Image: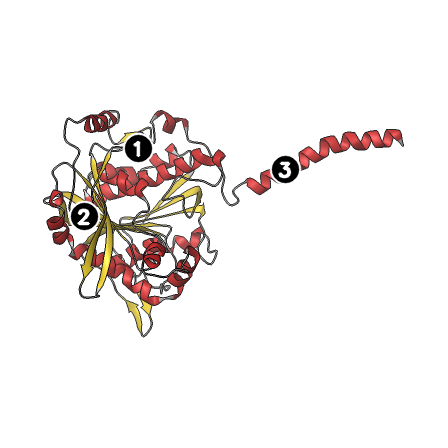
Amino acid sequence: MGRRRMRRRISNAIVIPLLSGVAAYFITRQTGGSGFTLPKSAQQATLFAPANPVSLAHDNTVHDNAPGSPARLAVDDVANSVSGPMIGGAYKPADGAHAVTEVPDIVLHDAKRNKDLHVRIFYPNEPGPYPVIVFSHGAGGSQSCCEALTRHWATYGYVMLQPTHDDSTVQRRNAGEEDINFLIAVRDALKKPALWQSRPQDISFVLDSLPVLEKRIPALAGKIDVEHIGVGGHSMGAFTADAIAGALVDLPNHPATNFTDSRVRAVLLLSPQGPGEFGLTDHSWDHVTLPLLSMTGSLDLGAGNQGPDWKKIPFERSQPGAKYHVFIEGANHMSFIRAKTLMPGRAAEGDSILGFTNAASLAFWDAYLKTDPAARNYLQSDALPEFSHSLVNVSRR
């Protein structure tokens, strides 16, 4: 009996830690995709260099970073460290050469719809003109999202406009809805066609208001290139950009409603939707011809647990020509707009995915809003998949 007890103790000492380790692995691993660390080439390229200084402004009181100032010299040092558009396969990884000013909130009034629209703005300080990108937040979000993307793009010579839509939890709470929370906002966004309609209308109203913005923010005068406009968005914001590109939306008593805005030259869809949400149908994309880049990942699920293949449908069913789809192994629904991860040990993974997102999206904007042939060649090449060690896959049509 003594020997049996001894064998049992030895077995327990070996088996229990082994089983605990296996259980811990399966509990903490990201199913559906593999984790990874930042590639060595990306570390050497300083994928996330120190951010450019951003001066703050409210409404029409704007303060630029003066040339020759310490802040601007710091920007120039970062810019000089980037010798050309690519470093080891990364597309413009550090912030660009432009110092950027932020207008945190300006309110535009839409008399036709009798509503106020809050807008956040980033713009380069140097004389323009610059292409314009309107970026639409996800359901329940607000204009305060996504600056890891929008501010980065502004440093490369873009005027960024970020409106807050009616589904925003912050906006609804400020309007007196004390019980509103994020989950309720998302549920309402999925079920209320009025919200599907108001979002693309917000985008077109922002474009209508470009002359107003130049008057209210004098530093914007001469910086807005109305001939080169893009629209991007994340999640429900991707739907918004999709609708602006011409994806047809079924509204009550108004099937196949068209929200196309002819002023828009290209659209970016971060975690878009396939048929069955927001009034989108099997044939919604039949006539979408604009340059389009969509993006999803192995852990990116829809509201109904639809998988990444469902999110690829806008790319697959739109008209061929200047269509791109980026798939990132290990990316979840929020990976495309922020580097934060739930597990501190995966911080490098979050930084990497956000870097891949910025590389593909900035190359897309440069290719189709600035007609930069080097950017288009980058999108057509395998540079990003190779740089990511095959964690990124790019499809083209």
Which residue type does callout 1 highlight?
A: Pro
Label drawn at residue 59: 2
Give the percent coordinates (x, y) of residue 44.
36, 24
Mark toward the viewer: 1 or 2: 2
Mark 1 near mark 2, Cβ–Cβ under 8 Å? no
Which residue type does callout 2 highlight?
A: Asp
The mark nearer the N terminus, 1 or 2, is 2
- Examine the image and state in which quarter residue 371 appears: top left
The mark nearer the N terminus, 3 or 2, is 3
The residue furthest bottom is: 253
Using a 10 Å C-alpha cutoff, classify the residue at mark 3 as few (fewer than 14 neighbours), some (14 to 19) or many (20 or more): few
Label drawn at residue 324: none
Q: Which residue is mark 1?
A: 93
Give the percent coordinates (x, y) of residue 40.
41, 26
Give the percent coordinates (x, y) of residue 115.
23, 62
For the point 19% across and 59% down, which residue is it? 109
Q: Secondary structure at mark 2?
A: loop
Q: Is residue 65 left or right of residue 247?
A: left
The residue furthest right is: 1
In the rendered image, the quadrant that contains the N terminus is top right
Give the percent coordinates (x, y) of residue 226.
14, 50
- Examine the image and state in which quarter residue 148 appears: top left
Residue 226 visible here: yes
Mark toward the viewer: 3 or 2: 2
Mark 3 to mark 1 CA distance (whole Å): 37 Å
Using a 10 Å C-alpha cutoff, classify the residue at mark 1 as few (fewer than 14 neighbours), some (14 to 19) or many (20 or more): many
Q: Which residue is mark 3?
A: 22
Mark 3 near mark 1, Cβ–Cβ under 8 Å? no
Using a 10 Å C-alpha cutoff, classify the residue at mark 2 as few (fewer than 14 neighbours), some (14 to 19) or many (20 or more): some
Compared to residue 132, the image places residue 152 above or below, namely above
For the point 26% across and 57% down, which residue is it? 245
Q: Secondary structure at mark 3?
A: helix
